[in-house]
Amino acid sequence: MVSYIKSNKMKTKCIHKDLIFYLDNELSVEKKISVEKHLEECADCRSFLAFVRDEMQVIENEKNPEASPYFFTRLSARLDEKQVYQTQSQWAKLAQPAFFSLVLLAGIYGGLKLGSNASSPLVNQQTSSGVQMLNDFAAEPIESFLLDEL
Amino acid sequence: MDESGLTKGIQQGDRKAFQILVNSYQRMVVNTCLGIVHSQEDAEDLAQDVFLEIFRTAENFRGDAKISTWLYRIATNRSLNFVRNKKRKGFFQSLEETFTGTKNRTREISENRSDQPDHNITDQQRSDLLHRAIDRLPEKQRIAFTLNKYEELPYQQIAEVMEISLASVESLIHRAKKNLQEQLLDCYKKKCV
């Protein structure tokens, strides 16, 4: 048997590359006849043809899956969810700028209020005494301070 | 209800029209997605995304193409994006596994098929081999081949979906089959199934 296959291989060249087109009936009439003739003689090509046919059968087996009965129910729920989210996000789109504007206005108002308090005479007095305390070095220079340490 | 009535209804947000559309094209969309992603669950999720997109963008539909062409286009685009994202995730996951030495549990389960009967192993291996071969095809060849094989679409309609010429579709499908044949031959010689 092996020697028979070997001898066939010696006689004719394998036609693997044509077999997928042969299966799909895409060869010319002449080519188809020659392929069929070759297949009668070549066990290796017959075996490969069966292999390719089985592989292509996978597509036939898995295509047209059964329709899920809850497909539209699920889809409808997702659609409702999306619409609720869109309505919420539309509110959020309006509410967010309004909130930040309010915060900004409150900040400006607060700033103005603080500014007006700062300019009152009492505060000026307090500030100047504070500045004096901070400027102690003016009264006692660093050189004399260091000399005292020695 | 005819196609223009359906699209008008959906454009006005009519749920009844939308349900008719979904019932008419559900199988077609799931099947198209399945041809690219090779998983029933993922295909159904993607089909739902396709219909949601249709409902959301119905007002942009001008009606110069058939509804099915529009659906095929969205279904193939979404499926290809899904596969691309999955590949990217897989790459990062494998990187993580390399550095941490951990292995994903689901992958472990899918790799360990020793408890299944023999004929199932062969069927599973057979479909895995074909899916791998299809996944290795360049994207355009993959779309043309899938639409032709899974949906049995004529070349003319594939050309409309992909917005290319008829000759290009013929060439793409011819090259896809040639590539598949080469991959199958390689596997056949190595006796990988």
Image: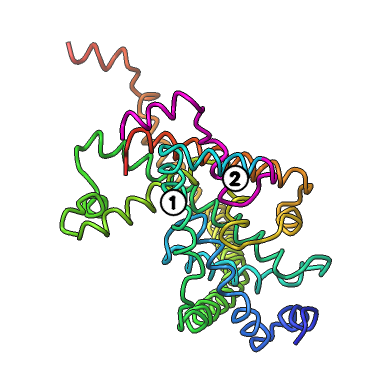
- In which quadrant of the rendered image does the C terminus of chain A lie? top left
Q: Is A148 in front, or is B170?
A: B170
Q: From the viewer's perspective, is the residue at label 1 or at label 2 nearer? A: 2
Q: Report the side of B62 relative to A90 (left or right).
A: right
Query: Is A22 covered by the magenta stretch?
Result: yes
Q: Residue at x 54, y 41 (%)?
A: B137
Q: Which residue is mark 1?
A: A55
Q: Are marks 1 and 2 on the same chain?
A: yes
Q: Which residues are magenta?
A: A1-30
Task: Give the residue at x 46% y 52%.
Answer: A53
In the image, residue A141 above or below residue B128? above
Q: Mark 1 vs mark 2: which is more N-terminal?
A: 2
Image position, residue A58 (x, y; %): 44, 57
Residue at image location 26% in from the left, 50% down from the top: B107
Residue at mark 1 to residue at mark 2: CA–CA distance: 14 Å
Q: Nearer the viewer, residue A46 or B12?
A: A46
Residue that carries the numbered disc 2 in the rendered image: A21
Q: Is residue A70 left or right of residue B75?
A: left
Q: Quadrant of residue A106?
A: bottom right
The local secondary structure at tag 1 comes to helix
Task: Tell me the chain of label 2.
Answer: A
Q: Amino acid at mark 2?
A: Phe
Q: Main secondary structure of the magenta part?
A: helix
Q: Chain of mark 1?
A: A
Residue nearest the observer in this picture, A7 or A91: A7
* Secondary structure found at label 2: helix
Where residue B78 appears, as percent x and y from the top left, is 57, 57
Q: Dot 1: within a 10 Å radius of its alpha carbon, few (fewer than 14), some, or many (20 or more) residues?
A: some
Which mark identifies residue B58?
Answer: none
Residue depicted at x 66% and y 66% = B71
Amino acid type of the residue that numbered disc 1 sits on in the rendered structure = Glu
